[in-house]
Image (cartoon, rainbow, N blue to C red):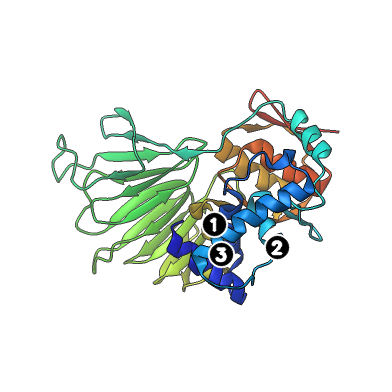
Amino acid sequence: MDKHQIKELLRKYENGTCSELEKAQLETWYLQQPIPDKLNLTTSELDAELNKVWDSLEKEHKAGHRGIQRRKLAIAASILFIFGMGFYYAIDNNIKKRSINEAAERIVVEVDPGKNKAIYIDPAGKRQILQGEIFVALVANENFSSSNTGYNTIATPRGGQYEVVLADGTHVWLNAASSLKYPNTFNDVDRTVELTGEAYFEVKHMPGKPFMVVSQNQTIKVLGTHFNVNSYEEEPDIKTTLLEGAVEVSNDRGESILLRPGEQSVNAADMISKRKVSVDDVLAWKSGFFHFENASLETVLNQLSRWYDVEVDIKEIPRKKFNGILPKHVKLSQIFTMMEKTSGLKFKVEERRILMEN
């Protein structure tokens, strides 16, 4: 975040108008400020270091008063997880170095978070590892005429995400373990793409030429709008969330539903329905966070598995529900340390497999 964004979030934080995601962004940034050997400091030394960081920030902010509580700001998204009835794990006077170290010892493999990476597959099947942060498909492949219906694919591996700009100006952000298949040239009737996994779309408005997204057993029809689609095969439902405009979502049984901004369709095995949701929560993944709202442990582990490129090797997953926001940029060991401190469950990683201890 730049200084302007930080100051704006600080103002909203002081006024109590920050969303949960904005709080997580600000608090995560705060903990990224240089504090040497945080866990090796005494309580008084840690307080002194926190005061130094905060005092320097206040000078930039020119607020002239201490409207934000240091302790509250230290309850950062990077070390925040809420389980069941709710519990905050924070860097404050309650830190116990011994329990932190014991948890770290159980997690024997250090796993880095995912990053921007993807593979481009052209109509002939040739693969290319993409460099940078964005792929722009501004013109048709030179080996195919405008009448050719060859298909291109952008695929993110487990532990990857990527931004794509299609030839019509539509922007697509792919989450981990996802793929977008699109024609070499859109026809004169519509603009149809195929999605597996999860993606956020900002569709270029083209009157008379709708944009179509096909994923598993559903089709989304739009003219110009912003929406998110979650259609991982391992998840029980397909969820489509609308931010702007209007979309029509239909399933393979001929049922359809119209979405307005702030609504989410849930395409289940036996029916399709819609509900009101927080779009900020749904798009947390695009902003660099995990957001869990009454999520099962299985759902949590599936998301961690895709982002950290590890396998879940647990025969009987406990039935627990989770709520909270976590940053995606931290190591997997840090995620598990948070989970262990609040849930009582014990996790470890061996040969890129997530295991649970009895």
- Residue 86: quadrant of the picture: bottom right
First of labels 2, 1 by sequence position: 2
Q: Residue furthest top?
A: 351
* Amino acid type, mark 2: Lys
**Mark 2 neighbour class, 10 Å CA radius: few under 14, some 14 to 19, many 20 or more:** few
Point 55% across, 67% down: residue:
10
State the residue position of label 2: 72
Q: Label 1 to label 3, Cα distance in Å?
A: 28 Å
Single out the mark in the foreground, 1 or 3: 3
Q: Label 2 to label 1, Cα distance in Å?
A: 21 Å
Observer-nearest residue: 120 or 71? 71
- Residue 293: quadrant of the picture: bottom right
SS assignment at label 3: helix
Point 18% across, 46% down: residue:
139
First of labels 2, 3 by sequence position: 3
Observer-nearest residue: 33 or 339? 33
Q: How many marks?
A: 3
Against 274, residue 185 (above or below) is above
